[in-house]
Amino acid sequence: MLDGIQHFLNEASAIIWGPAMLVLLLGAGVYLTIGLKAMPWRKTMAAFGLLWRGRKPEGKGDITPFQALMTALAATIGTGNIAGVATAIALGGPGAVFWMWITALVGMATKYSEAVLAVRYREVDERGRHVGGPMYYIKNGLGAKWHWLGIAFAGFGMLAAFGIGNMVQANSVADAFESTFSIPTWVTGLVVTVAAGAVILGGIGRIAQVAAKLVPFMAIAYIGGSLVVIFSNIAEVPAALMTIISHAFTGTAATGGFAGAAVWAAIRFGVARGVFSNEAGLGSAPIAHAAAKTNDPIHQGMIGMLGTFIDTIIVCTMTALVIVLTGAWTTGETGAALSAQAFATALPGVGNYIVSFGLIIFAFTTILGWSYYGERCAEFLFGVKVILPYRILWLIAIPLGAMGKLGMIWLLADVLNGLMALPNLIALILLSPMVFKITREYFAK
């Protein structure tokens, strides 16, 4: 029976993440970028200025605009930035990195639109908290006849959270501790559960406070380690970049332990891992942005789009360059093991610790951020009474994920993530005239 379920999930994943979904995700991003007249690219530096000012709130909400982005990044920067990039390169060759960049560049417009709509159509719940996200902008923006679509998103999101945001991450942490420090998985599971519980039970305020401290620290530390490798091989960087760009259009011949990959493989794995990493179009990040203390949807949209830029253009590129510069991508390794080998080759004795600690902290913050996403989806479906039971279930799932064999959980998470994206992309396209209109009006002023 389990074999049958696994076969079904494999088939479903191949269909959901097949050409149609990748075209829809990229197509929506291209359409929104054109409709916004490439504003996300033109206003990137202005958005960083808004982020700096966003540490001080300027409107109604529960957390500062800065904390909202850090919460979104906490959920976004995870195993995808280390294991996901490595997997994309292992399956699609270095050219996959180029398609990750393209996904991120058009994904900035998607993430901008998500955050704009999240703030514009958010609500205040029975506890006085600001709640929003795709389910709310479907309900309040598209009207009663589309309410079923919001319910579908919330259902998929509530369940997907336990995969991508909980058990998969807990398993990555436990695996990293076991392979690096020989700590049993059950010990890691218990410690992570207690640490996560101390944060999650405090609600969005405490999650945002922890994210605002951990996310900048972990990103700077990981980028710093990557830059040491890059600068020590600075003469080879132009050749590495040319390898990435040329292989994006020509495919990659077999070399070393690498089996070779066609152009379609580079596109497929680059786009799929790019979306898994930055979550543009998935509909997760706007749930965090809806809680921001702001009266201006445009400001929060601009801050929101930086999530994709930071996650993929900066952090994922660091991992990719280290893997390509060291030549580790030809060894036949994949996933986190490939990233660890690349760093260990460049920085003997400390490189594997950079990957292990990066993976541990990235995965832990993802558990925190996704707990909030899943909780908001559950609240949309069942009301505020579900919040405490959901948090308790969330904490129970952590040690199960840490000790389990997660092949099927990975597949299920993959399927549910794809199903989350569909209602969100439909809503984004239908509500895009509103996004274009208020953006035009804002910049006309």
Image (cartoon, grey):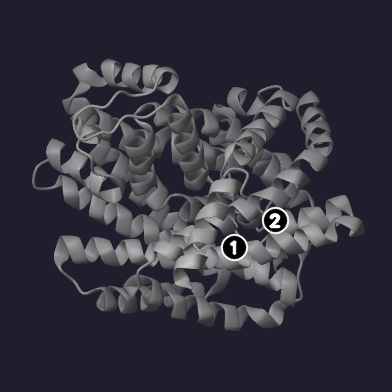
Choose top left, top right, bottom left or bottom right for residue 402.
Answer: bottom left
Amino acid type, label 2: Gly
Q: Tell me where residue 278 appears, x and y as whole percent.
A: 51, 44
Q: Nearer the viewer, residue 393 or 264?
A: 264
Q: Residues within 10 Å of mark 1 (few under 14, many from 20)?
A: many
Q: Residues within 10 Å of mark 2 (few under 14, many from 20)?
A: many
- Give the residue at x 82% y 41%: 430
**Mark nearer the N terminus (1 vs 2):** 2
- Which residue is the extreme one toward the left? 349
Would residue 253 be seen by someone viewing this image from the given angle?
Answer: yes
Would residue 67 be seen by someone viewing this image from the given angle?
Answer: no
Q: Is residue 276 above or below residue 255?
A: below
Q: Is residue 342 left or right of residue 368?
A: left
Q: Is residue 128 above or below residue 254?
A: below
Report helix, strand or loop for mark 1: helix
Quadrant containing the C terminus is top right
Amino acid type, label 1: Tyr
Disc 1 target residue = 373
Q: Are marks 1 and 2 in contact (CB under 8 Å)?
A: yes
Q: Is residue 252 left or right of residue 249?
A: left
Disc 2 target residue = 133
Q: Tell me where residue 140 appears, x and y as whole percent.
A: 85, 56
Q: Nearer the viewer, residue 31 or 96?
A: 96
Please count the marks in the image: 2
Q: Tell me where residue 210 appears, x and y as whole percent.
A: 44, 62
Q: Nearer the viewer, residue 281 or 223?
A: 281
Q: Is residue 364 above or below residue 281?
A: below
Q: Is residue 9 above or below residue 159?
A: above
- Give the residue at x 14% y 36%: 346
Q: Is residue 352 left or right of residue 129?
A: left
Q: Tell me where residue 392 appears, x and y as whole percent.
A: 52, 82
